[in-house]
Image (cartoon, rainbow, N blue to C red):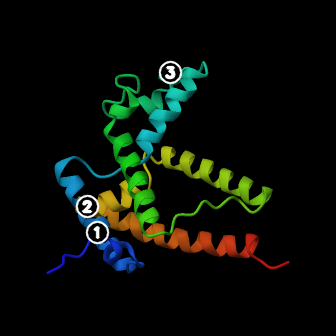
Amino acid sequence: MKSKPFDLKWLLGSFWPDWVGGILLALLNILLTAIYKPWGVTSAITDWGMRIWALLGGHPEKWVDYLKEADYNFLSKHPFFSEETILNLGVITGVLFASALAAQFRIKLPRGYRQLVLGLTGGILMGYGARLAAGCNIGAVVGGIASQSLHGWIAGIFLFFGALAGSMVLKYFFMRTR
C-alpha cells in the first residue's frame, strides 16, 4: 500500500466559512483569557510608540495619563520580551503564513494619493481613539465576551451600530460615483 504525501490543501486549499473562523478565534481567545489575560493590541503598540518617541528625544515618561495603567513601565523590559508584542507578532505571522499557504497573499498598494492619505489619517485617528478609550475593540468586545463580562456585549452592540453608521458615511462621502 502506497502512502500519500503530507498535503495541507484540505486545510488551506479553499476559503473557510466565516463561522468557522469566528468559532476558532473565540475558542483561542477563551483559552488565552484562561491562561493569561484577554487579548489586547494597543498596549504593545503604545509601548513601541513611546520607545520611538524616546529615541527621537521625547520624554514619554512624563505622560502621567499613560503611565497610570497598572504596572505600566515601558522601559522596564525589552519590547520583544513583552507578552503583548509577542502575541501581536504571532497573529501577524500566522495570518501571513496561512495566506501564503492558501496562495492568497498579495500586497496591494494604495490606488492614489487620496486613498493613502485617508488610510493614514484613519489609522492615526483609530489609534488615538483606542488610547483615549484605554483599549481597542479587541480588548473591549472580544476580551469582554471571552471573560463573560456584560461590558463586552454592550460594547459589541454599540460597535455594530457604529460600524453601520461609519459604513453609511463612507459610502455617502467617499464611494459615490462622480
**Disc nearer the start of the sequence (3/1):** 1
Left/right of residue 84 with respect to residue 45 in the rendered view: left
**Which residue is denoted by mark 1 in the rendering?**
24
**Contact? badges 1 and 2 (CB < 8 Å):** yes
Q: In which quarter of the image is residue 175?
A: bottom right
Image x and y of residue 132, in percent: 51, 44
* Quadrant of image for the C terminus: bottom right
Image x and y of residue 63, in percent: 50, 26
Image x and y of residue 131, in percent: 49, 44
Q: Which residue lies furthest to the front in this view?
A: 1
Which of labels 2 and 3 is toward the front? 2
Q: Is mark 2 on a helix, strand or loop?
A: helix
Left/right of residue 99 with respect to residue 178 in the rendered view: left
Relative height, residue 91 to residue 53 (above, below): below
**Which residue is denoted by mark 2 in the rendering?**
28
**Which residue is denoted by mark 3 in the rendering?**
62
Q: In which quarter of the image is residue 114?
A: bottom right
Q: Residue furthest left?
A: 1
**Disc nearer the start of the sequence (2/3):** 2
How many residues crowd around disc 1 within 10 Å: few (fewer than 14), some, or many (20 or more)?
A: few
Give the residue at x 45% y 65%.
99
Q: Is mark 3 on a helix, strand or loop?
A: helix
Question: Which amino acid type is marked by label 3?
Answer: Lys
Question: Which amino acid type is marked by label 1?
Answer: Leu
**Contact? badges 3 and 1 (CB < 8 Å):** no
| Between 100 and 54, the one nearer to me in the picture | 100
